[in-house]
Amino acid sequence: MTMPSSTAAASPGALGVAPTSHLAPVFAQFPIEIAHGEGVWLTTRDGRKILDFYGGHAVAGLGYAHPRWLAALERQARQMAFQTNALGLAVRERAAARLTRFAGLGLDTVFWLNSGAEANENALKLACKITGRSRVVALEHGFHGRTAAAGAVTWGAAAKWYGFARTPFEVRFVARDDVGMLEGAIDAQTAAVIVEPVQGMGGAFELSTPFLQSLRGRCEETGALLIFDEVQCGVGRTGTPFAAHRSGVVPDILTAAKALGNGFPVSALLLSRRVARSLKLDDLGTTFGGGPMACAVAEAVIDTIESEALLANVRTVSTYLKAHCRVGPVTGVRGAGFLLGLTTSRPAKEVQAALLERNVLTGTSADPHVLRLLPAYIINESHVDRLLEALAQVSP
Ligand SMILES: Cc1ncc(COP(=O)(O)O)c(C=O)c1O
């Protein structure tokens, strides 16, 4: 058998991946290669130091190489790197207790998984199973992941990348904050409503409290389960443990991932008593979910957020950023905590490129005029000043 030569591999030159790459050509890439990260700073292979306001797409909540995170990984790897859920582990129990206490929402049962999409997939499956219904309501501009059920409730997926011939359930999309649409859209056939309380990909858009309260009320009336996808906006990113704290609306199922592991894959479903009570053996399963490394890391992340008072830092620095960010091409700001969208007079992608030339890394979103900031919770005002200086140099 002849091996393919390296040049016969996918050649997505237009996407910025080297033509000799063996990686699937599915990601557009920034024109830099990262060699090292520490705190909120990235060092490129050619020695540039870049201030990171993107946080590995909302993952690096503690920043890079945080000593507590490193210590937890090393300690757990030496003690027990992996065990199946068929065997009990103190670290798994401890991390679940820690997560529910941190959340403080009365969602006291945890099911561990590995990624955001996987968490949403299981949440939706559970809702369909518990209710025996086959319709799901989601929001326009929402993003929930790339798997069959999570992709089905992701706005625009069908037109862009969904790929499956059928969705696992019927989906209805509702406009953001449109209370008037809820009564018609959510009925006795609805298994679940899934929303991000602060939409990430949708451009750092925070749903209003009256809308979330109406959603909660309509779910009560119809028996549908309310799912909060806090994969991006949760685990401290909005300056509260979860974004649910901002509205006071508590879902039946909450999904968390990204910052929960600070780079080690881990996600979780937090379940209400009603949902937990309906579970029986074998309803859910996973090999890697609840692995000891993931649990040790989640525990360390929450410990660090609390012991270093990072929620207060997110709130303080976010307020500072919001107050001063209207410089250069920035016309306004939306979102919450460290999930912020700077609205831009020019296309956000152009502003992003200009900032990267000035050694500041930022994100964009599905809204072409929103530059998204997802920095680590340890970012301070002097880092914000650097961002503002760079923005001031970009023409409006
Ligand atoms: C709100 C939200 N839900 C789900 C996901 C999917 O998570 P993952 O990429 O870990 O599957 C993402 C990813 O960006 C997200 O932002």
Image (cartoon, rainbow, N blue to C red):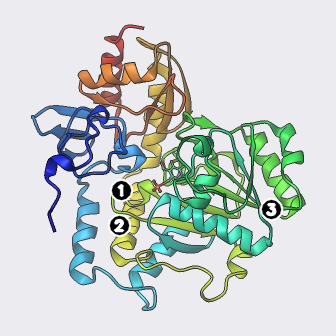
Near-viewer residue (140 or 108): 140
Say whether residue 299 is visible.
yes
Badge number at residue 262: 1
Question: Residue placed farthest to the bottom in the image?
Answer: 87
* Residue behind label 2 places its C-beta within 8 angstroms of ligand 1: no
Q: Residue at x 40, y 66 (%)?
A: 298
Quadrant of the frame with the N terminus: bottom left
Drawn side of residue 110 relative to residue 306, left or right: right
Amino acid on which the number 3 mark rests in the picture: Ala
Q: Are marks 2 and 3 in contact (CB under 8 Å)?
A: no
Q: Secondary structure at mark 1?
A: loop
Amino acid on which the number 1 mark rests in the picture: Asn
Q: Are marks 3 and 1 in contact (CB under 8 Å)?
A: no
Residue underneath mark 2 = 297
Quadrant of the frame with the C terminus: top left
Badge number at residue 61: none
Residue underneath mark 3 = 224
Question: Residue placed farthest to the top in the image?
Answer: 395
Amino acid on which the number 2 mark rests in the picture: Val
